[in-house]
Image (cartoon, rainbow, N blue to C red):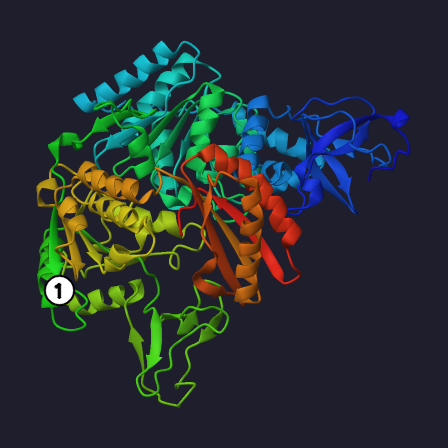
Amino acid sequence: MSSLLPDAAAGVPVPVLVALPAHSPLSARPLHYLHPHALPAGTLVRVPLGARQVLGVVWDGPEQPESDSVQLRAIGEVLEALPPLDAGWRQLVQFTARYYQRSMGEVALSALPPQLREVDGTQLARRLKKLDKAAVGSATEPAEAPLPLSAQQQAALATLQHQRLQAQGQPLPPALLFGSTGSGKTEVYLQAAAALLDEDAQAQVLVMVPEINLTPQLEQRFARRFPQHRMVSMHSGMTPAQRLQAWLAAHFGQARIVLGTRMAVLASLPGLRLIVVDEEHDPSYKQQEGARYSARDLAIYRAHHAGAGVLLGSATPSLESWHHSRPAGDGDAGGRYLRLCMPDRIGAAPLPRVRLVDMRQQPWQTVFSAALLAAMEERIARGEQCMVLLNRRGYAPVLHCGDCGWKSECPHCSAYRVFHKLDRTLRCHHCGFTERVPFACPSCGNQDLRTLGQGTEQLEEALAQQLQDLQRPDGSAIRILRMDADTTRHAGSLEQQLGQVHAGDVDVLVGTQMIAKGHDFRRITLVAALNPDSALFSSDFRAPERLFSLLLQAGGRAGRDAAIGSRSELWIQTQFPEHALFAALQAHDYPAFAAQQLEERAAAGMPPFSHQALVRAESRDQQQAQDFLNLALHSLQQYDPQGLVFGYPAIPMTPQRVANRERAQMLLETDQRQALLRLLPILSQLLQQHRPRGILRWAIDVDPLAI
């Protein structure tokens, strides 16, 4: 434990970032501690904060504290075994905190592995010994040979190489790799990484994926291709010890390849030369708690300032990336991104045929149309696989009583609890409140409780009943597998289930959107999407973009093997088959869909033609939350006399109440990003000043994805 040093003669003041409570008056700047001598910025130290010893980062800042009357405490311990975090990492933290309106200490410390915040110098030394032992070993298996490239892949790689040579030390433009599903984007990632790793012995490559379930497949591809280079993963599914070892390997430069989810964008990578953002359109790259950063956008910022390349890959790019990569023409200077196109699948495999089933012509409460079932039976009889997509887990969204109208509402949220038949529970997917299914209606005692809607559990049960007489080509019973957050929550279950699908042990895969993107399922020839209509008429202007992306990505899981690709189909059961979105989907024409959406957004002044920030507040009382936000908006207007930023009055969020907390939101919008960024720090101060006792918490979400 460090001791109090009564005067500056006992040491020099050192600015240190520590994690402080959000919106604390002290969180805007580093705290000062005493040490016998100055320490380099980026050094990790342990310092006293109240009665605790916490991890801190020595920061760039004033050498003297703001007040001479403050009695400074001494730094408890310097973690000298770790090299200081470099200037590029510190700049990234500073930008993230400023842009997303969070404290630098919160961003910096949350970017470090949790276990690093707990260990002392002795414990750290033991972990570094393990790290050194892991680095000594070398791979004995030969590297997998690169796959032959198509003309489009060759052109994409040649363009990337040309841009790198032409840059001559200048920042590289972000590159958008727009390739259809199955066009070989991963091979482009692999060969682009190989070129840099061979060229520079210190180079590091960061490969980002949106979700944990996509990491096993990509890990295998990179491990087979680069057995001579150390590779580590970074995601929340790892144990604290694993996360620390991976971070240390990256920080010391031992890990040449880092594969991770959004958290990896803030990792310490001193030799960073390339960032790959796979499925760059995916909303999972946006953090929804704490510092609400976009990992994709931070990757672009980090690559620009590190002199590294950044490659964004997707078959359905975000409309922002698509707009920023537009070619020049008709008086338009074009976007600042480079667009690389690979519209054809490898091996000339055709894209799946899209078939629409008009559910208005089907019998009431039909789950699977007769035509779809017949098509699935045909595939299974040939030994091929089918995939059924429904983005709702559980058995049914609502349990209700037909006599009195009772529904399975959550007592803590303005939402319904979902019926899970497997364990006979009603679960709220917002607050987690769980109860056993009642034997009778709690209101009237009726024992005939019924379900409304469908979830993945119900689809699995319905398929098992309707396909029970069907056999595989070898005469054995068919196998139906359900993959969702419920079935993959145990350690190792995700990898095991994916292995069963790849091995051909599964005939029908049923799941949520986690099975729809990024996976290379070679035997699937039919994908069915059920009940996608709710997104067609959503109040969220991004809903059509997300739906088109999900369906096109899901269809892309079918027919990836050229030998059977000619039979691949995407079936969509919908009440609105005439909708324009489905017409674009049938033509696999993302550019046409994007053009139509961008035209609508330009007319309405929506992103990417404007910039937004969403302010949220939680209280026990809805009116208080709205009044709090409206008062801050009214006060903000005096700092914006030109009216560059428009603020909409506060309204309830959806759902309005979660865990007994009333939620309200207020939207700020402008066509000048700098005007918004200038006002947001002022707004933060106003919110803190006007915060009444009943406001539980508030937050600013810059560039929100869900409104």
User: Disc 1 on helix, strand or loop?
Assistant: loop
Query: Which sits in the foreground, 35 or 579?
Result: 579
Q: Quadrant of residue 168?
A: top left
Query: Which sits in the foreground, 34 or 52?
Result: 34
Q: Quadrant of residue 597?
A: top left
Tell me, yes or no, if residue 469 can be seen here.
yes
Q: Residue 607 placed where, x, y %?
A: 35, 40
Q: Residue at x 67, y 41 (%)?
A: 27
Query: As displayed, is residue 490 above or below residue 305?
Result: below
Q: Quadrant of residue 439?
A: bottom left
Left or right placement of residue 112 versus residue 275 in this view = right
Q: Residue at x 24, y 30 (%)?
A: 184
Q: Residue at x 34, y 79 (%)?
A: 400
Q: Residue at x 10, y 51 (%)?
A: 382
Left or right placement of residue 678 versus residue 188 in this view = right
Query: Which sits in the foreground, 187 or 226?
Result: 187
- The mark total stands at 1
Q: Residue furthest front?
A: 641
Tell me, yes or no, if residue 518 can be seen here.
no
Query: As displayed, is residue 698 above or below residue 87?
Result: below
Left or right placement of residue 65 versus residue 281 in this view = right
Which quadrant holds the N terminus? top right
Query: Which sits in the foreground, 507 or 202?
Result: 202
Left or right placement of residue 663 versus residue 591 in this view = right
Q: Residues within 10 Å of mark 1 (few under 14, many from 20)?
A: some
Q: Residue 222 placed where, x, y %?
A: 36, 30
Q: Residue 383 placed where, x, y %?
A: 14, 51
Dot 1 amino acid type: Ser
Q: Residue 398 placed where, x, y %?
A: 35, 72
According to the picture, the residue beneath numbered tag 1 turns out to be 369
